[in-house]
Amino acid sequence: MVYKPKLKEKRWRIELEEKLIELAEEEDLYRFDLKSGKPIFSIDTPPPYASGKWHIAAAVHYTQIDMIARSMRMRGYEVYFPMGVDRNGLPVEVEAERRTGISPHAVDRETFLKVCRQVLDEYERDIIRLTRRLGLSCDYRNYFQTDSELWRTQTQRTLIEAYRKNLLYEAYRVSNYCPGCRTTLADAEIEYREEETNLVYIRFRVKETGEPIVVATTRPELLKACACVLYNPKDDRYLHLEGKHAVVPMYDKEVPILSHPSVKKEFGTGLVMICSYGDRTDVELFRELGLEPLVLINEEGKMNEKAGAYAGLAVKEAREKITKDLQDAGLVEKVEKIRHKVPICWRSKHPLEFIPMKEWYLKQLEFKDELRKLAFEVKFYPEEHRQIWLNWINSISTDWPISRRRYYGTELPFWYCLECGKIVIPEPGRYYRPWCEPPPFDKCPHCGSTKGFRGEERIVDTWIDSSISELVYCGYGWNEEMLKKMFPCSIRPQGIDIVRTWLHYTMLRGYQLFKRPAFKEVWLSGLGLDEKGRPMSKSLGNIVDPDVVIEKYGVDAIRLWGAMEAKLGSNYRYSEAKVRSAYRFLNKLWNIARFVSCFPEAERPNQLKPADAWILAELNELIRRCLKGYEELDFFIPSNAVYNFVWNTYAPHYLEMVKWRAYGPPDSEPTRSAWYTLHTTLKAVLLLLAPITPFITDYIWREMYGSSIHRQLFPKEIDGIDDKLREFTARIKSFNSYVWKLKKVELRIPLNAPVKVEVPADLKLFKEDLVHMHNIQE
């Protein structure tokens, strides 16, 4: 009998991946059916920012979210896997301005919004193209946009409800302010950069005694705003100054000298000036000590009119000029170069200032205890990453400033009465643009005036929109039946880098709205780094373009490498060599499947041959390990388990042992035992790999077994197999390796050449297969 492979292609071809994408769309393979009767598993898919091209780490992150969806389908769930694109906020504006050169301050608002939309549309098309190419099994016909009327309507609905619950308030207080972006930022949006700067030692004098004292500062431009001088109460050098006053040089301003434990004795001279406002510590100390602020910096990041001779200068220019003026006046002891951390804007990387401004705040301080409890009502993958969120909750010291003095985002849905000045809010249910449209009411409910209203011009922090993603996806405000069945969402998958923003804000807002967690589980992945362990960024020039890697190795190779590279929650490094290795494995799998496809499927015989029973025992262990990994949503486990099984056991040992039987007569019991085992094992391997490498597994399955592998469930253990047979694995491998080495190294003969060697007595069960495998002459 001639055995010909069903798989005609001699190698796995990357271009087949795109054909399978088209086929899946034609078949509506991943359609979500709310009424299927299966348990529902809903995914709060991270809506990616449409403000730039992805690098390889972003691609890997989303493929692993897809692995969650695919593995849950194969566990019997009806999976809701929506796709959304984040199109709001500062990143969008920054990219639009960079791309077009059009400043929002140079054109009217509507014109700038149009420019933003054009840039967004371009990036969105690329995101959808790439995620589709990466094999994400989500619904592309009904994807969400955070700047859509539907989404913004629901964002405003939550704001109106928060205001009515007294969770939203406006206050004048010191804010984190980015002069480059001209907007307030939340603490979670601050990054820190280490920079070299001058530490200027300035000569003050004590009013009561006339003695000189030296105060070291990195912010001499704020000298006029100095409100007190502090020292550490354990610093014996300055205990005699308690209760006295320092005279600020150049301004002859008297300020108190006080002790405070926050002062580091080793910094500078141990004396520090507290100004309004050099850093966040200054802000806290002004509040604690009841000091009167003098603000010298305006919203453009320049010195204001109160700065006198330095008015109009940029902060850095003023710093340099006042240092020179102090030196010329003999008021500088010395200047040292130091390195220190500077707070910067997370997006523009511009150094921040701390400026009093009137902004809207969402309460969060009073919810810290509830959020800590909530953290233990949600399952975390991996469990230890719960602490990342708890650490952030513990660090929160202010309510969340949510208003932004920018343009492309969801507007605060408020109007103000021109007569009494009080706020008037509309009924929720539609999208409002107060800055350019009249209110949906004519009369002020507070004073009865009909003189008109002023619309709010500010927008909200983009995280206000993103933090209701699970609500919008699940039908909040637009499909109540769906919301009842699907909320709370089953899982939030995201990176560890946005725990303090996306995860925290979503849990906060979900609790404020529903008094329960927003989702049941949280899945946190590590960061993708370059080969040197550095984050990928344009400035470092180390970004790896996923399209280039796809063209060379295909998507399945990227997905397999990403899954194999690190345990869930751990950072990982990109390595083209390892992607290439994953690609080689896929071709190994193809060759195995092509070999197995030569033979028909067979029913399980009454008596399996020992080698067949042995590999099925190993297969059962593989199934157990993989299913445990899938239950833990850690794809490192099944990917490595399957790789090691196929590469180190199934292909080199079992296949070589049974080839002679596989090619035997079709009515032979040993042959049919081999056929049954070959197909059973291959099927299980394909099923266990399907969520990770969806293309090659689906193609092989369709060609060999019909239909799509993505309509199947995970394999179950094979009944009636003695697990003790696994005790032979090490001995079988050891004997095979011994014979191969004997032939190649000592005898220098081909591997198929006859050889005289004795099969060990403890392997007598497998003697017949081993004799044929090695061509042993007895």
Image (spheres, grey):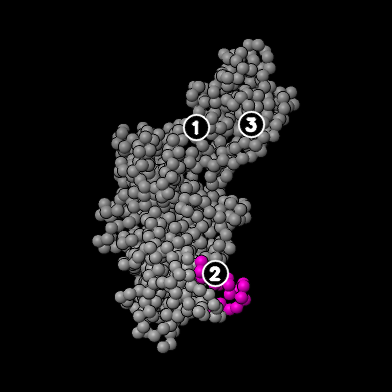
- Mark yes or no: residue 201 visible: yes
Mark 1 or mark 2: which comes first in sequence? 1
Quadrant, the N terminus: bottom left
Residues packed near mark 1 inside 10 Å, few (<14), some (14 to 19) or many (20 plus): some
Please identify the residue farthest to the bottom as the structure is shown: 1
Residue at image coords 34%, 67%: 721
Q: Quadrant of residue 317?
A: top right
Reading the image, the residue beneath label 2 is 738
Residue at image coords 31%, 37%: 165
Image coordinates for residue 515, horizontal then vertical, percent: 30, 41
- Are the residues flagged by discs 3 and 1 in contact, CB closer than 8 Å? no
Check disc 2 and give the amino acid type: Tyr
C-alpha gap between disc 3 and disc 2 = 71 Å
Image coordinates for residue 372, horizontal then vertical, percent: 38, 38
Judge whether 610 appears above or below 440 on screen: below
* SS for dot 1: strand
Give the label on residue 174, or none.
Answer: 1
